[in-house]
Image (cartoon, helix red, strand yellow):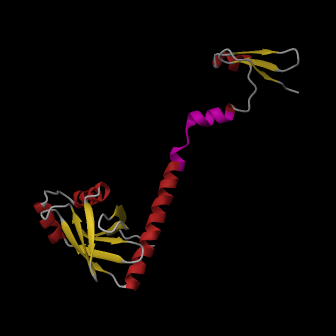
Amino acid sequence: MEKSILESRSVLCTLLNKKDQLKYVFFTHRREGDINIGFTNGDDVWKTHLSQEVLSQFFKRFSLKSTEDYTFKLKSACKTGCAFIELQENSALLHLGAEASDLSLSFAKLTDSLGRTEVKDLLFKMAESLQQLENQSASSSFSPVKGAQKRNAGRIPTKATAQRSSCSCSKTPAGGFSHQPRNKTVKILIP
């Protein structure tokens, strides 16, 4: 999937709809100041386009300062259970609160072919996001201290290492070492 500098896609959140107890995934597409918001239940897809003009009206009405504030409001409403969806034949209405004065959005249902394309794009975006998280996790899990501990794990304790680790090692008559960390004796036999 090609990425455009002018467009960014992101998954916002999931919603357990309190009306019908079905789950939905919300996503956005941002392009040149406009934003498309959509949601899917995996079978059908609903989408709406918010131009800069419509967004500025929402910003004034709901005291929002940016598109990020708007998506944060949507995400928060989904997470707290305040949002709910009313499905109609070829459209849907999203409510971000119980009051009539709360934010509501109207969505159009996409055709099956456009819906499949949207779900496919969403699936690949989610896979890419997971891969990025795994890569970040793998690179941040390296620790110089843990690396040094792994390198020293196979070494036989000597008097010098015993003193550094504040325990005592002594040679036993059987040819091994007696290692005493914290008042416990561990015998290491070397053939």
Q: Nearer the viewer, residue 132 or 42?
A: 42
List the single residue furthest toward the front: 20
The residue under the point 35% across, 66% down is 21
Q: Position of residue 160 (x, y in %)?
A: 70, 17
Q: Answer with left or right where residue 187 lies relative to residue 23.
A: right
Specify whether residue 149 is painted magenta: yes
Q: Answer with left or right where residue 183 lies relative to residue 66.
A: right
In the depicted structure, whether residue 88 falls above or below residue 81 = below
Q: Answer with left or right where residue 163 lies relative to residue 56.
A: right
Q: Which residues are magenta?
A: 138-151
Q: Nearer the viewer, residue 42 or 168?
A: 42
What is the number of callouts on the image? 0
Question: Could you tell me which quadrant the N terminus lies in?
Answer: bottom left
In the depicted structure, whether residue 171 falls above or below residue 36 = above
Q: Position of residue 171 (x, y in %)?
A: 81, 15
Residue 59: quadrant of the picture: bottom left
Q: Answer with left or right where residue 144 lies relative to residue 60.
A: right
Residue 92: quadrant of the picture: bottom left
The residue under the point 70% across, 32% down is 153
Q: Position of residue 42 (x, y in %)?
A: 42, 73
In the depicted structure, whether residue 64 falls above or below residue 4 = above
Main secondary structure found in the magenta portion: helix
Q: Position of residue 65 (x, y in %)?
A: 17, 57
Question: Could you tell me which quadrant the C terminus lies in?
Answer: top right
